[in-house]
Image: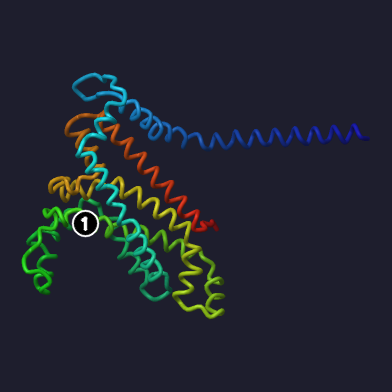
Amino acid sequence: MFEMANNVMKRTRNSMSTLRRQQIILAYVLLLPSLVFLGMFTFYPMVRGLIASLHEWSVLTPPRYLGLDNFREAFSNPYFKIAITNSIKYLVIVPVIQLLSIILAILVNREIPGIGLFRAAYYIPVVTPMVTVAITWGWIFDSSGVLNYLLLSLGLIKEPISWLVNPTTALGSVMFVTMWKGLGYYMVMYLAGLQSIPKELEEAAVIDGANGWQVTRHVTIPLLRPSILICSTLSAMAALRVFDEVFVMTEGGPMGKTLVAGLYIYQQAFESYRFGYAAAVSLVLGVIVMVFTVINFRAMARGGLTYY
């Protein structure tokens, strides 16, 4: 009797082990197409970029091994320092854009007639190509553009301001365009997070005597933390890798005041044909992005990040 029970247990374990292997094989089969694409378009370029960063490489000469010389040159190059500094300054817009996006999401998270039109209107800048947006705002910021006309008409300024030429205002003007375009994107993500919060919790807080601000602060925002983590991380990565609007609106000027890391990498790779040096700068930028991502995750975790 005992031997029969033991045999049954062995057969059960064997069948479970076989089923487990089949599930693992099936999982890898289903993941195989994605793994192939990740390998081809993500991991292979990363490895090639790492190799290129250790070489002097251009389209005119064969690669020549330099070791860490490209990295040494980067950290001693004043334009590299300006580009990295401006990219880090760009992080200033991250908390601003997140706060404004949350406010917009709360405002449009209402069941009133025509609310869909407001949501679509806020999202239009997101689907508009950045080149079109940059050219349009370039006209607005022009010394004879709409913005100066309005400010002069209201008596707020006495003479036109060259927003994109003045070293004091150029970077801030481009940062404003980035923020304006990204608001709708993060608003939709926060709106999805708001709509996944159980209404019973907010209703219970109201019944307990909480006003609108208290409900938002103690119920809505804490439950929105996963969305805040995702959006702030994506926003920080986008801010550090910004390129299009800077390239179209200022090309890094005036006097390098709007030169950012993405534009600096482009100039070194496709204007100076220094692909090895550009790869080294790209790796430095990648490390900076990773550091800020880890900091963001840890900061949110200390704030009590929970997933629902």
Taking 1 as reference, is 270 left or right? Answer: left
Q: Position of residue 17 (x, y in %)?
A: 71, 34
| Camera-nearest residue between 219 and 12 | 219
Q: Horizontal and vertical percent for residue 299?
A: 45, 53
Count of labels in the image: 1
Residue located farthest toward the right when viewing the structure as drawn: 1
In this rendering, the answer to whether 110 lies above or below 51 is: below
Residue 300 in the image: state x and y as whole percent. 47, 55
133 and 183: which is toward the camera: 183
Residue 257 shown left or right of residue 84 in the figure: left
In the image, is residue 34 above or below residue 107?
A: above
Q: Nearer the viewer, residue 48 or 124?
A: 48
Question: In the figure, is residue 144 to the left or right of 103?
Answer: left
Across and down, in percent, residue 48 comes to 35, 27
Secondary structure found at label 1: helix
Q: Depth check: 296 or 226 in front? A: 296
Which quadrant of the rendered structure holds the C terminus?
A: bottom right
Q: How is the image coloured?
A: rainbow
Characterize the local packing of mark 1: few (<14), some (14-19) or many (20 or more) Cα atoms within 10 angstroms: some
Q: In the rendered image, which quarter contains the N terminus?
A: top right
Q: Residue at x 78, y 36 (%)?
A: 12
In the displayed orientation, state which residue is furthest to the front.
76
Q: Residue at x 47, y 59 (%)?
A: 225
Q: Is residue 270 left or right of residue 217?
A: left
Please give the name of the residue rendered at 14% of the width and 47% of the height, measured from the top-left corner. Answer: 253
Q: Is residue 255 above or below residue 38?
A: below
**Which residue is identified by label 1?**
172
Q: Amino acid at mark 1?
A: Gly
